[in-house]
Amino acid sequence: MSVNFSPYQPPPDVPSTDPPESSSKKGKSKRPWFTRDQSSYSPNSYQSGGSISDPTSQAQAYSNDPEAAGLLNGGIGGGGGGAFGEGDRANAWESRFGWRVDFMAAGTYLGGPITALLFLILETQNDYVRFHAYQSALLTTPLLIVFLIFKLIIPLPTFLRVIYILAAIGGTLYTSFRAWKDAQEGLSRYWIPYIGEIAERWSIPITRHYILNIPLFPAILFLLIVGFLLNQIKPHPHPPYRPYNQQKDLTSSPFLVDPSLFLPPSTKTNKPNYLPEPLKPKNNEMLIPNSVHYVYGLKNPKNDEEIEELPYYAYLAIRSAIINLKPEKMYFHYKHLPRGPWMELLLPYLTLIETEVPNEIYGKKLNHFAHKADVLRLLAMKYSGGIYLDIDIYVIKSFDDLLYFPITLGMEASPDSRRTSLDPEGLCNAIIISHPHSSFIERWLSSYESFDGNNWAEHSVVKPWEIARDYPNEIQVLNERAFFWPMWHGEEIKKTHEEGIFDFEKTGQYAYHAWESLAMGYLSKLSPKSIRENDNSFNRMVKK
């Protein structure tokens, strides 16, 4: 028997491990979406890579991608001494559903923590995709939490919020692009500082024998519930309504009448030329224009010499609004402009509007200047919107959290001790916070069809409370402690100006109504000196 000592030749049916020569054949380009090709290999045969005849031969990857073979030595599951057998050898390009690795890795960032969670649940095989899913979750979840904090708890100026949003979106898109690009250039991993190291530790490969099989339907249901809960965080300032141009697409009735064909109501008023156009709110979520309105100087003097000076207490009230509300414009509606040193100090901050004083409304005579002022403030709120303040309103803190609803009014408590706090005298018009063309203001103005000048506070206090009870979804009502506390009855005014029992800062109220007509004995004597020397609740408040 002769012995053949020639070099070992592999059987003819073993495929060559040498890459094809590019000069003679057009080889397949290396891409991360190569399909597996195991048809010619059996894990138990020598064709899977090993050979009984040649113990030095190396196992081949279950893929037609020549780079995959290099993953078997030194990778998890590679080598004869690994924890996993030959049947567990992984292809770095493989994914559970055969989807493209580069698209999946990039997609983990595009939907924030939602898509990151989705890919962690569904893609249990590809380590590269899972790494980027973890990194996306660690990056986008804190960004989303910080955004919600700034939106709901600590409001940021609009320009700072825009900068934050652009930076967050830009950083996320760049990371997504790197995940897609690196997948096409050999699966190198782009680490975000601090986050990448954590994601690398968490992205442990899951082999075929340890796939986390989570049913698809419960996973989708879980994501829908998370999305619903996140949506509930968003504030809804007022009930949504469907305009006519959308409603007509849903209503098939042949009897529907286009609102543009309606006859104008008999109580319709025309916009006075002197009223300004509405300003923009402080931010996009707010509804109330960033403006403050005062109505003053409607009394007719006998001659120019009798035009009154602006009193010091009125200067202090307007000053408090400038400091605490910080409006873009402060409109001063007047017929006879007051004089004096305190007015001179305020002029740089005021936008003066010489008004036309109404003498009637809907055919009803307006004899008292207070009733004329009532109508003027409603017209200003209807056409310009913003915040209206009486001249004796002292603003204590910002109204910003009240500017997300179309209209806000405060209760004026009843002096009758037998009535409960929810049975007030009415809603006082000394402070009105309103969106332009608010439906509530429209109803309020229309109620003047029944105006009777003999009923002093009927339309300024009682009527708005009646309208609020009929249309509770159109108005935001605050209790009497928000604006109108302490009250005017009993000894409340005396205690405010002679004692120090009220701490306006600790009460948390937005403003204090000084009840000018009843407290004039105290207000008319105010001066810088008296405020410095006398320690009482009122003086401590205006010093702030």
Image (cartoon, rainbow, N blue to C red):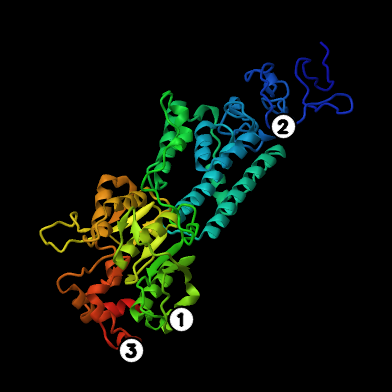
Tag 1's secondary structure?
helix
Residue pictured at 31% horizontal, 84% vertical: 531
Q: Which quadrant of the figure has residue 30?
A: top right
Residue pictured at 57% horizontal, 42% vertical: 109
* Mark sitting earlier along the chain (2/1): 2
**Disc 3: which residue:** 529
Where's the N terminus, which quadrant?
top right
Distance from Cα at disc 2 to Cα at disc 1: 77 Å
Return the x and y of residue 352 as percentages of the image width and height.
Answer: 47, 70
The amino acid beneath tag 2 is Arg
Which residue is more in the foreground, 21 or 451? 451
The amino acid beneath tag 3 is Lys
Tag 3's secondary structure?
helix
Name the outermost residue toward the right. Answer: 23
* Circle 2 residues within 10 Å: few <14, some 14–19, many ≥20: some
Which residue is more in the foreground, 182 or 363? 363
Residue pictured at 24% horizontal, 67% vertical: 485
Tag 2's secondary structure?
loop
In this rendering, which labeled residue sits more in front, label 2 or label 1? 1
* Mark sitting earlier along the chain (2/3): 2
**Disc 1: which residue:** 344
